[in-house]
Image: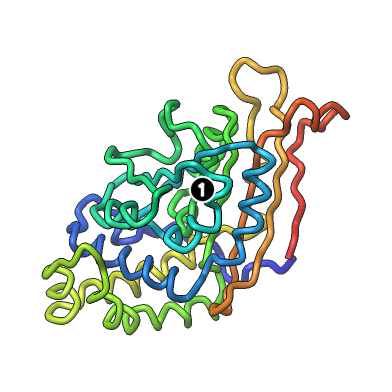
């Protein structure tokens, strides 16, 4: 497995700051949602996600850090036979997620703020994150994974960014994409046009945050190390048996591919052979 060419730098992204105006944040995430759908960025994760759902027997997905809905307009119909509900959650719930949820019978936008590292116990279901795990520093990232294990929930994270010079070059296209995508964002807001064509704050935020996202993205080896560091759930003598896979997939229209980590608890039948206390991490390409 190749190592990243650039060191990981945990810098701050503009759109995730509390002081970032909502129209700019929503405009930036709206552009990324349109890009994820139009470019089919996550089409090839569907078989992996479907297999993990089948093993975990979960009928609900709890999508964390959803922004405006991410790739779910394309993915939700492909998982309709396996999933009764896909819950879109975020620390800053957006109107865009509400609009996206209205387009599918399985999508639902959760109106309350959700901390991805402390998911409310009532929000049970297989957890997903799309291009969001890099937002978390190592301690927070570990806490996010640990919370899923402690609550016995499956989890899958997918990253479209990568720590490489090529990835940084790809991010230079984001401001130009914003000029085309902003008028397509729903719900339509005049503020989105203002912060794009009169004062180009949304294109600038996409450029800066895109570069920062690449520099914050975890490599496959770093994801595996985080998984190995997980502790047993409270009140248990050893770590609950989980099946983990870490790897990369190609992306139809992107040279960067998709980095992923997927974990789900093994059933009592699957773990009868004396599963090791260490997570089983299989790397695929």
- In percent of width and height, residue 280 lies at 77, 42
- In percent of width and height, residue 260 lies at 61, 57
Residue at figure coordinates x 57%, y 49% from the top left: 81
When asked about the image quadrant of residue 222, the answer is bottom right
- In percent of width and height, residue 205 lies at 29, 70
When asked about the image quadrant of residue 265, the answer is top right
| Few, some or many residues within 10 Å of mark 1 (<14, 14–19, 20+) | many
The residue that disc 1 covers is 128
Front in this rendered view, residue 245 or 123: 123
- In percent of width and height, residue 66 lies at 39, 52
Front in this rendered view, residue 77 or 13: 77
Relative horizontal placement of residue 274, taking residue 253 as reference (left or right) = right
Front in this rendered view, residue 178 or 96: 96
Above or below, comparing residue 182 to residue 30 in the picture: below
Relative horizontal placement of residue 4, taking residue 90 as reference (left or right) = right
Secondary element type, mark 1: strand
């Amino acid at each position: 497995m190749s190592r990243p060419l650039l060191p990981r730098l945990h810098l701050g992204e503009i759109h995730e700051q509390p002081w970032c105006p909502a129209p700019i944040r929503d405009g930036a995430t709206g552009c990324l949602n349109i890009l994820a759908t139009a470019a089919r960025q996550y089409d090839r994760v569907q078989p992996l996600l479907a297999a993990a759902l089948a093993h975990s027997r979960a009928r609900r997905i709890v999508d964390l850090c959803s922004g405006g809905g991410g790739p779910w307009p394309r993915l939700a119909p492909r998982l309709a036979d396996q999933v009764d509900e896909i819950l879109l959650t975020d620390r800053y719930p957006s109107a865009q997620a509400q609009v996206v949820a209205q387009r599918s019978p399985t999508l639902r936008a959760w109106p309350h703020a959700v901390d991805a590292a402390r998911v409310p116990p009532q929000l049970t279901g297989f957890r997903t994150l799309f291009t969001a795990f890099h937002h978390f520093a190592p301690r927070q990232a570990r806490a996010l994974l640990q919370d899923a294990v402690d609550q016995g929930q499956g989890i899958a994270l997918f990253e479209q960014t990568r720590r490489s010079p090529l990835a940084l070059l790809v991010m230079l296209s984001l401001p130009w994409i914003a000029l085309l995508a902003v008028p397509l964002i729903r719900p339509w807001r005049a503020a989105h046009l203002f912060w794009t064509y009169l004062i180009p704050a949304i294109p600038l935020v996409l450029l800066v945050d895109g570069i920062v996202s690449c520099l914050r993205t975890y490599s496959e080896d770093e994801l595996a190390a985080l998984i190995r560091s997980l502790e047993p759930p409270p009140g248990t003598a050893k770590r609950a048996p989980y099946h983990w896979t870490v790897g990369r997939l190609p992306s139809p229209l992107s040279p960067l591919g998709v980095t992923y980590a997927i974990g789900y608890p093994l059933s009592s039948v699957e773990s009868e052979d004396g599963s090791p206390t260490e997570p089983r991490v299989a790397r695929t390409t």
